[in-house]
Amino acid sequence: MKKLIFSASICLLSLAVSAQTTPTTQPDQQWYLRDKTPTTAGIDVERTYRELLNNRKPTPVIVAVIDGGIDTTHEDLRRVLWINPKEVAGNGKDDDKNGYVDDVHGWNFIGGKDGRNINYETAEVTRLYSKLKPKYDGKAGVALDRSAFKGAEQKEFDLYQKTKAEVEKNQKQYKAQYEGIQQFAGQFTDAVTGLKGTLNVTKLDTTTLAMVADTAKSMSVKRPAMGILNMLRQQNVGDADNMVGEFAKYIDQLKARAEYHYNPDFATRDIVGDDPENTKDHDYGNADIMGPDANHGTHVAGIIGADRINNLGIRGIADAVQIMGVRAVPDGDERDKDVANAIRYAVDNGAQIINMSFGKDYSPQREAVEDAERYALTKGVLLVHAAGNDGKDIDTAANYPDPRFIDGMLIPNVITVGASAEPNTGDLIASFSNYGKKTVDVFAPGKDIYSTVPGSKYENNSGTSMASPVVAGVAAVLKSYFPKLTYADIKRIIVQSATPYTTKVRRPESEDTVDFSTLSQRGGIANLYDAVKMAMAMESGKGTGMKGK
């Protein structure tokens, strides 16, 4: 599930909100690509191409993006999309005999053969609750007692009680938040509209608002100007209309949580037409890798490999990448069956790196996902997974796909990525990021990341969902310029070449101060320049080439 990053604390009287949102910036402000400095923990992308890779020729690398969809028409992505060389577009035939008809750019495991697509889905906890309810729900309002069950059924009864409480709590909570923020957003919008009319302007940016707040004589003008200005400054948003737009997106997210994710009566899998319990089934879906909402996947794809030579929009990290779209992540929790099939599809069709910017708290078909990860391991494919946005220690807290097999062994071809922030914004770690000294391999920029969104547009988003494709992009550069590197080489290089920090930071979702080095295995932030230097040293037989690291 795409976790909420926007966490609002509302004070209606002062028009003040404390939140984390997606400020608007300019294409040349891709801070995460910049050179590493004391105030910017960038990954040295342009410097790497300029100083280390200038005279080298890359080999194209296929990177699969398992996500909610990719805008295949985007100006910055069209040229870098993977094209299935053996498939003829639109002829209704499985030309390459891989089991998927017209899979020109990838495949969609959350769509039906009739062309319909899933947009919203329930959370996994809601599906578990709905599955257990018929067996363990009391009749005529009389609750069943745990003592009525034995052995495995008692454990199942406990799970039912837990999931029921979680679903009911979340549905109530998100409904209240939805109604509250909707009311506040309406008041904010009215204040913006009213002030525009009073001032006879079409735009309220921070410069205009600061001048009005400073010079206005009337408190009926001064007060709303100051309130709106404070809001924009807190959120690092430059224009009031952009803030209105952010509220609209956040309201949609809360509505989805209340009405779909945690609603036991909501069901949409019939669109696909498969048996969701049958993990051996792979004959379902359609070729529409865009789907009804391609915002998240398009953003992820752009970070990895947006066209670097077309002088439009942004530059991706990798310059010789082919992006394969595999749609398996709805607005809600992805199903284990779809994730497993998505991994297998990507591997079977040539992906060497797979980005997985998704996660959830429950995994009832975990074995199917792990079997797919083992399959990817046998084919030498690297899986890059977002650590999650709950601000929790995933050494102990549940987060799936788990970086460990069920037996506890770390999965060797998975690299788990936490989100870092730009140091001059106040902290080195993103406040929402999951962490773990044993299970998170490395951090990468994941806050205020500017990338592609549908309609050939661009915007900032935050999350470990953005940090993961940064690392996938680094991995793609290494594989394309040093094709002999194995998945194990690439993972080791990325982790060992990460810039270590001993900076004191606030532990996510707490007031505790800890050493940044304690939050991941490496205690560092991925860096392309140092990774390429290490790969060059390995190529020349000079060891790691990373003195002092």
Image (cartoon, rainbow, N blue to C red):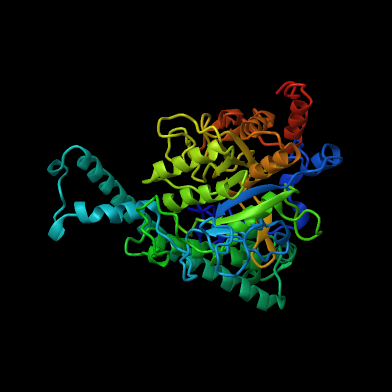
Relative to 65, residue 69 above or below: below
Number of on-image labels: 0
Q: Position of residue 364 (x, y in %)?
A: 36, 46
Pick the quarter of the image with the C terminus: top right
Q: Nearer the viewer, residue 417 or 378?
A: 378
Q: Quadrant of residue 258?
A: bottom left
Compared to residue 168, the image places residue 527 above or below, namely above
**Side (left or right) of 295 relative to 212:** left
Residue 309 visible to the viewer: yes
Image x and y of residue 403, in percent: 49, 36
Depth check: 217 or 258 in front?
258
Residue pictured at 75% horizontal, 34% vertical: 532
Q: Is residue 519 left or right of residue 305?
A: left
Residue 169 can be seen, yes or no? no
Query: Percent position (x, y) of residue 478?
Result: 71, 38
* Towards the viewer: 410 or 441: 410
Relative image position of residue 153 (x, y in whole percent): 20, 42
Q: Residue at x 43, y 30 (%)?
A: 408
Q: Is residue 428 left or right of residue 167?
A: right
